[in-house]
Image: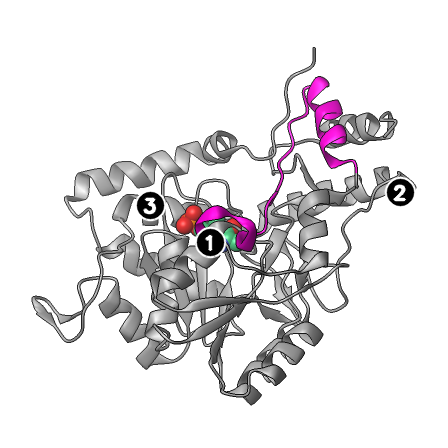
Amino acid sequence: MQNPLFPADPLGGYLAAKAEIDVAVARVLASGRYILGPEVEAFEAEFAGYLGVGGAVGVANGTDAIELALRAAGIGPGARVATVGNTVTATVAAIAATGAEPVYIEIDPATMLMDPAALASVLAADANRNIKAVLPVHLYGQPCEMPQIVNLARAHGAVVIEDCAQCHGANANGRKAGAWGDLAAFSFYPTKNLGALGDGGAVVGTDPALLARVRRLRQYGWQTRYVSTEPGRNSRLDELQAAVLRVRLCRLDGENAARGRLADGYRIGLKGATLAVPTVAAGRTHVWHQFVVRTTARDALKAHLEQAGIHCGVLYPVPVFGQPGYLQPVRLPLTEQACHEVLSLPLHPGLTPIDVARVTAAVRGWRG
Ligand SMILES: *Cc1c(COP(=O)(O)O)cnc(C)c1O
């Protein structure tokens, strides 16, 4: 049997930069500063510069980043937040943690991202303007249709908070994902395109008042040390993770380019196969966090590939509104169909063109 292939490879990501990461970690260990010190400050500045936004605030994880961004923008009990159902539960857990309620928007089946036309009709039906925020999810590495989504939200008086957990470095119309909304939330979970060696997250934006509020909320509501001006949380990024992220940020564009070359290999290799391959909308770049194919016989194809040592992911098998913890009586046929059909082929910067050829051959050899 050939070596197994996996959807992601966090150990490989560490080993690829081991010498530099080990130096960075040793530097932090020897410094005596382990929480909110010079590494977090430097990473915040470097990440904001990379994205072209005014500032970044390191937090404990991506879920907290979404929650604190919403709360900083004034979202809480009584508010409704427009998002999608085909996302990780975290997106909706963060909305619920603020006391607000999710409103699910249908997806565009071509990209599996929030459909601006569906958003427009939901906003038009929201006569009392209870929808106070729009939370698009840049799923799989491709940004949503941001110019339209931002315009629709603004016209409705709603803020835009981007869920950027899967699209570090992607562009929409020449602007980075994360630079469109009032605030944007990133996760640095180890398997993300920019991954830490543990949990991490960041809220980014340009409005100084919003960023200052996120800074207070991440640490007990402190305006200055020992003086809270509002209730807050503990959600801090630590120095070790920040030091690792500084190393990995320097490699992000190169690793995204490597993902792009592998994705091109898949798209060429799967031409004419009996399944749907992902497309990239005009004006956008895709950073290939996931390479997601679609087939009505998804589970059979997944089992077939597993036989060949090719392990695939399913992001996500059940829409959030269909999960017992977040159940809502929602019918969104295109979202539900996507959840039944999606399959993530192995894709991470450690794969080779030979691995991709092996996967495409296995897919083509499948009689579904
Ligand atoms: C990973 C992820 C999150 C949550 O991030 P955590 O760091 O695990 O809390 C939120 N949204 C999306 C789309 C994600 O992929």
Q: CA distance from mark 1 to mark 3?
A: 31 Å
Is the shortest distance between ligand 1 and the CB of mark 1 under 8 Å?
Answer: no
Q: Residue sitting at 71 percent across and 29 percent down?
A: 302
Q: Please state which of residues 46 and 4 is positioned toward the viewer in this rendering.
A: 4
**Mark toward the viewer: 1 or 3:** 1
Q: Amino acid at mark 3?
A: Gln
Q: Which residues are magenta?
A: 297-326
Q: CA distance from mark 3 to mark 2?
A: 41 Å
Q: Position of residue 189 (x, y in %)?
A: 43, 45
Circle 3 packing at 10 Å, graded few (<14), some (14-19), many (20+), is many
Q: Amino acid at mark 2?
A: Lys
Is the shortest distance between ligand 1 and the CB of mark 2 under 8 Å?
Answer: no
Residue position for label 1: 326
Residue position for label 3: 241
What element does badge 3 sit on? helix
Q: Mark 2 and mark 1 in contact (Cβ < 8 Å)? A: no
* Residue 56 in sight: no
Residue position for label 2: 271
